[in-house]
Amino acid sequence: MGDSKKDNIRKLAAGGGLLIFGSFASKGIMYFYRLITANELGAADYGLLNLGLSVFWISLTFTQLGLKGGINRKVSEYFGRDEKERMFSTVWTSLKITLPWSILYSTILFFSADFIAKTAFQEPAMKTVIQIFAIAIPFQTLYSQMESTSQALKEVKHITAVDKIFRSLFTTLATAAVLYAGFGLESAIYIQAAAAILSGLLMTFLVQKYVLPVFSNIKPLRNKDSTDLLKYSYPLLFSGIIGMVMTWTDTLLLGVLDNASTVGVYNAAYPTAQLLTVIAGGFGSLLFPVVSEHYGKGEKDEAIDISSTAIKWIFTSSFPLLLIMVIFATPLLRLLFGETYTSGAPAMAILGTAYFIQSLGNHGDTFIKSEDKTKIIFYNSIVAGILNIILNLVLIPMYGQTGAALATAFSGTLITVVAVLEAYRLFDVQPYKLRKLIPPTLAGLISAGITYFTVKSMFNQTPELVLIPAAGMFGILYVTLYVLFGGLDKNDLIILSQAEQKIPIEMEKTKEIVKKLADHSP
């Protein structure tokens, strides 16, 4: 293995591992937040909170104008070429466009909140919800630009510190304090807005001081570079809008076609299923700048090799989580949210399966973006977005929240598969090494079968507290069978080396064992 490939796999393992750790920590903290809000507010007000969040995140897609993706692509490319001035000017140009527009957009949203609440949602209480979130939109836009800058330069510790830890802790602890003090929905929304404002300011400070001092090196972007940035970004704007609409269409249409209580139950199942995206998101957020850097150097084969390694790590780590989520869906929701929310179990299993499949195909978009063919992503998004809306309109009246899950799962998976096929047919990108995926597949299915039938032989209805020992049993079986089936390879040594640098545990013996097993694996 060449030094360049080793170095980039180390970056992927270290940075991706840090983001995954931060994401799991954040998800754990935010699960506590969801438990508090779901139980203290009740399903109806919890549904209103999530409807407000859907308006907030869809609005963010409009205010970013696709330039977040432009920063990630262009700054990582210029970094690979050591063109520092163009890095500064790219970020500054993006900020100069997005910040004034986000302020104007949030002002319009604030004063139209009453009309939106009464017309779209038939919920007068949504007026205040929308207005509070509108105030935070410019600060979240600022955060997104700074986050993308940090990702492009592979400095992800600030993202972990601000978004994954600080924001999660602040939101959860402050919300718990105000709700237990007797305040209601409005106070919970103020906390969400304050978290976005503080995160935007803190991330800007950290990027300015430790990553890229943008405001100390304000440089105009050359006309050609500015045109390239906008040409690259504007298809991402429209595909991002469609993608965000796809993300929140199920929630919004459940609110319109059903009721806020159903939205509340669905938004207990939905974020649980999203746990399957944490691992892929950790590696994926670094995979794009790594791939773009190699493209800037003309090293396409290196980029494909790195992607292949990431896919194996994502599959091996995510597949067991999916199996646990599917076979124990009902007791898992009962444990986390209570009996009221167990009706969301089918939706959670459907969405979890879809997110797992999609996480294995994220490289399709990555390589299309790296080839500067962002219009392809735009056209894909149009088809998937229209299909998603149609399916939600048809399936929600028939099957409620399960119909919403089916619509979102099918349309999202379709666009992922299409992007993978396009990357293969147009750019000859095929990073899948199926032989490497056989060991985790066999280990997962056998472990899940043994665990499921063992628990079912002892209990007719799985008690919540049995989930912990059952998960432990599954984990031990999975790791053991994975090793016996020859799942380890030499790239796994890189993960152990990175772990050894982060935690005070001697791993030389472990690495020797892994090396011997890897040498004998097929």
Image: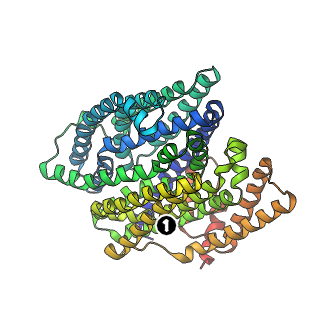
Q: Position of residue 409 (x, y in %)?
A: 51, 60
Q: Is residue 220 left or right of residue 357?
A: left
Quadrant for the N terminus, please: bottom left
Which residue in the rendered view is the most extreme toward the bottom?
522
Q: Please name the residue shown 46% across and 47% down the image.
A: 248
- Asked whether residue 404 appears in the rendered view, the answer is no
Q: Is residue 269 above or below residue 121?
A: below
Q: Is residue 376 left or right of residue 471?
A: left
Q: Quadrant of residue 5?
A: bottom left
Q: Position of residue 497 (x, y in %)?
A: 56, 57
Q: Please name the residue shown 39% across and 48% down the image.
A: 151
Q: Report helix, strand or loop for mark 1.
A: helix
Q: Please name the residue shown 28% across and 67% down the image.
A: 298
Report which residue position mark 1 lands on: 309
Coloring applied to the structure:
rainbow
The number of numbered badges drawn on the structure is 1
Q: Position of residue 39 (x, y in %)?
A: 66, 34
